[in-house]
Amino acid sequence: MFGINFNKPSIKKDKKGNVAESSVEDIKIAEGVKEMDEKINSIQNLDLKEISKKLEGNPSLKEKIVNNFRKVSRIAESAGLFAADKFDAILEKVSPEVKATVEMLLGAGTSIAGSIALNSGEEGAAMSTEKILILMPVILIGIGASIHGFFKSDIELTNE
Amino acid sequence: MDEKAMLVIADKIKNKTATKEEIASFLKEYNKLLTEIKEDLVAK
């Protein structure tokens, strides 16, 4: 659906090219971010419109997916990844197509960050499961980009 | 790690007080949730 390429964080190494001992947690974080990218890419490549139709016949599974996705969104929101000043700007930078899709689904001029807080507020409560499923990759891209932005500015996993 | 524990770390991330170890654990659990969503989406 949408394409995104993140810069993979690199690992601290000494002059001989060995991984620094202090970098063990950095490696875990870098692996975690890489895995997250792969998961997000694999979900965004699914035909969620089609899957949404298919799930009509399995309401309990549909509810489970939506509840888990609300959980993912809730946690991301608590981590500050939906901060209005960051999230909207990041999504716009990532892809104008993403922004256009959100505007089509939510209405032009709607705050992406506000509308995407699926777990709270009247709009979130009223949002249909179909819309949530269609918006899922958009939100995941935003979360992924925010996490990358966070690591770039706060952790600096760079070569020395 | 349950959602409550993840929310605690998430709050630390927001306040820039999370340790690298906590962030690594957070990502591990976050990826587990994404895996579960993906598996459920492609379930027959």
Image (cartoon, coloured by chain):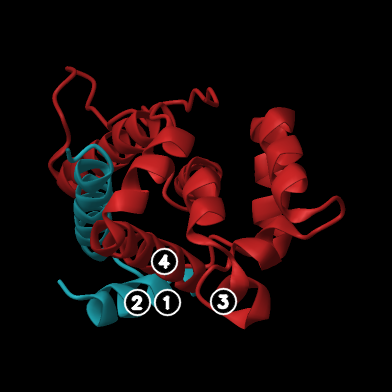
Label 3 vs label 2: CA separation?
20 Å
Which mark lies nearer to you, 4 or 1?
4
Distance in Å between CA atoms under marks 2 and 1: 6 Å
The chain under label 2 reads B
Depth check, mark 1 against mark 3: the one in front is: 3
Question: Which residue matches tag 1?
Answer: B11
Instruction: Tell me the residue that label 4 is attached to.
Output: A70
Image location of residue A50, percent across then percent down: 43, 34
Q: Which chain is cyan?
A: B
Question: As shown in the figure, which amino acid type bears the numbered disc 3?
Answer: Ala
Query: CB atoms at circles 2 and 1 under 8 Å apart?
Result: yes
The image quadrant that residue A123 belongs to is bottom right
Is A59 situated above or below A3?
A: below
Category of crowding for the residue at label 3, using alpha-carbon neighbours closer than 10 angstroms: few (below 14), some (14–19), many (at least 20):
few
Q: Amino acid at mark 4?
A: Arg
Residue type indicated by callout 2: Leu
- Asked which secondary structure carries label 3, the reply is helix
Q: Is residue B36 left or right of residue A81?
A: left
Residue found 44% across the figure and 70% down from its top: A74
**Disc 2 secondary structure class:** helix
Where residue A86 appears, as percent x and y from the top left, is 67, 55
Mark sitting on residue A125: 3
Q: Earlier in the sequence, mark 3 or mark 4?
A: 4
**In the image shown, does A84 or A112 lie closer to the viewer?**
A112
Kindly identify which residue carries mark 2. Answer: B7
Task: Give the drawing colour for chain A.
Answer: red
Q: Which of pointers 2 and 4 indicates the residue nearer the eye?
A: 4
Marks 1,3: beta carbons within 8 A: no
CA gap between label 4 and label 1 equals 17 Å
Q: Are marks 3 and 2 on the same chain?
A: no
Residue under mark 4: which chain is it in?
A
Q: Chain of mark 1?
A: B
